[in-house]
Each structure stands twice: as structure tokens, then as C-alpha cells.
Amino acid sequence: MRILAIDDEPFIRELLPNFTAKAGYPDVETAESGAAALRLIADSDEGFDCILLDISMPKMDGIETCRRIRSLPGYARTPIIMLTAMVDKNFVNRAFEAGATDYATKPFDLTDLGTRLNAAEATNDRYAKTGAEPAGHLNPTVPLTDSSDLADRRRLLDTPTFRNYLTQMSRDTLSQSQVFAVTIEGFDTTPGQPFDPSFPVTIGLIDNTLTETLHCDRFFMTYTGGGTVVVVSDRTGFKSVSQFQSDVQFLLDDRYQKGGQVPSLPLNISVGRPIRLNADNVANVEKLFEQASFLAQQCTVSKTKKTDPISFLLRKLSIHSWRGK
């Protein structure tokens, strides 16, 4: 695996090749800035299989560098591991929104860095076999190769990246966060079945409706299969599960009736009770996913008690007012 390590500190640029070599990855080039890294990538015939990227650099910081690398041909799915001494939630969120797939904290731990490099290599191997972009991992039946396939891929993470995001949260961030699942009734993507062309539109529509209804600035989501989307958000996202579910369903119905880029059939969803995150439950992410999915499947959309338009608009105005503070 060919690695490009980007850091403005000379000491780190000397240290990283030694660390990666001990982890079994000796093929490393270094760059002292985002601009230098972009030149190296442009001039490289072989390309790079993994990027180690310092988040805090002068002029072009790691987040902007990550965003620019993601826009380059051939780098939509390259693992990008952010290097940071900061565990501030805002920096972490911005990094994942820009396209990071993982991050390692300074000072480096050789075992931890090696584990993340191994995971990056496994990711490359998986995509080499399937030909899938990161979003394609969400639906194993087909690759999604165009960023326009989904409405906003900043919040839509592939499942390994979503898992990395959860497990790397600081203790303070965990205490302020929750996970819940949204189940799309009758919607499934199973390996071996023909690709459902409504998949990108459906996931994009769920993303848009959550953006409109969640009472928080940022959230991330991943499609885990079986018609289930798992979401992580601030605990302020919503207070009433039934009301939130009704609001999401109302907005989905409204958009379907208006037509445009919507699935061929109306979507019916159920929302599970949120699970507060802590060090214990993020230690077993698969079990956490199963629990969130189970809670969503226990809920059904009430057809007799729907959100009325005036009530929904009033709540929507309150959300926008809160975000404007």
C-alpha cells in the first residue's frame, strides 16, 4: 500500500515513515503542506492508496486538503486518516464531512496506527473486488460511482467510516450523543438481487427529511441493509420519538405528492427510540446497530394520527429559529 503522509511539522514527517514501516507499510512519501500534497498527487503516475493527513496546518488546513483530494479523479474512495491532537467534536465532524474515513490522535500509538492502516488496506481490497465507491458499500448490490447519485454525501458515511466515527469519539462527545435507526418499510437491498434504481433517491430523501426535522446542526447516517438507516446525532436532536416519526413521515408524504425526484412508491418509515452513547455500547458497534434496528422495527407509522401541516410548519419554524441563535 502506497501512503502519502502530509504534516507541516518536520519531526512528524520523519517519524511517520518509521512508524508505518514498523506496521508493515514502508512505501511512504511525505509532503509539508496541502498544496505540496496536491502537487505530489498530480505528478504521481502510480497514485496513492492511503492518505495520512494532519488536520491542523497553516494556510490550507487538513480539512480543506481532504476536501480537495476527494474531488480529484481516482480519490473518491481512497482512505484518508486524519492526524490530530484535537478531539474537539467540531473538528472531528468537519473532517468526516470533508471525506475523512478515520483519524488517529497524536502522540501516535504504533499498535493503533497499524490497526488503522490495516483497516485502510482492507477497505481498498474490498473496493477493488466490488468496484464500489464508499457509498456503494451502503448497498452491496451495486457501486455508486457518481457523487450526484446521492443528495448530500457529507452526512452519508459508509459503514466502516461510521463505525470509526463512533469508536473515536471522546468521552465528553459520547455523553452528548445518541444513535437511532430509521427503518424504511418494505425496502431492502440484499446481495445478489438486482439493484433497485430508487436506492440513491430514497437515501437522499431520508437525508433531506432528517435535515429538516432534526433539532441539531450536524448528524451522520449510514445504510446498514435491510431497509435500515442508522443515525448518530446530538441528544438535542428530538425529544418525542412519536412526534419526530410523524414529522418525518409527513415530510416524506408531502414530497412524494409534489413529485419530482422521488421514489416510484411512497415511503413508510418507523423511527426507533434513541440510544444514549457511552464507552460500553460503542465498544460493540455491531450490537449497537442491532439494538437500534430492533427498536425501529418495534415502531410502526400510525396512519390514524398524522402530523397536520400547520403543526409541522410551526415546529419547523422553531427548529430554524433555534439554529439561527
Image (cartoon, rainbow, N blue to C red):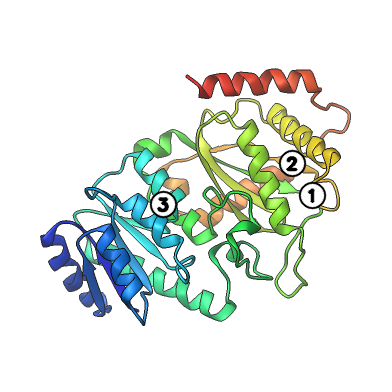
Give the residue number, with chain letter if any, for mark 2.
270
Q: Position of residue 125 (x, y in %)?
A: 48, 78
- Left or right, 9 with respect to 179, comes to left
Please name whichever residue, 276 or 176, is drawn nearer the observer in this view of the structure: 176
Residue at image coords 42%, 35%: 175
Drawn side of residue 244 relative to residue 51, left or right = right
Element type where label 2 sits in the image: strand
Cα separation between marks 1 and 2: 8 Å
- Position of 250 relative to 297 (above/below): above
Can you name the residue that lies furthest to the left here?
11
First in sequence: mark 3 vs mark 2: 3
The tag on residue 185 is 1
Work out whether mark 1 precedes mark 2 in sequence or the reverse, and give the earlier one.
Answer: 1
* Closer to us: 34 or 298: 34
Label 1 CA crowd tier, 10 Å (few <14, some 14–19, many 20+) = some
**Residue found at x 19% / y 72%:** 17
Q: Secondary structure at mark 3?
A: helix
Evaluate if marks 1 and 2 touch, with contact meaning CB atoms under 8 Å apart: yes
Judged from the image, the secondary structure of the residue bearing numbered disc 1 is loop
Label 3 and label 2: CA atoms lie apart by 26 Å
Q: Which of 145 and 103 lies nearest the eye of the viewer?
A: 145
Q: Which residue was labeled with disc 3?
A: 167
Residue drawn at the location 41% of the way across and 52% of the way down: 167
Q: Position of residue 308 (x, y in %)?
A: 81, 22
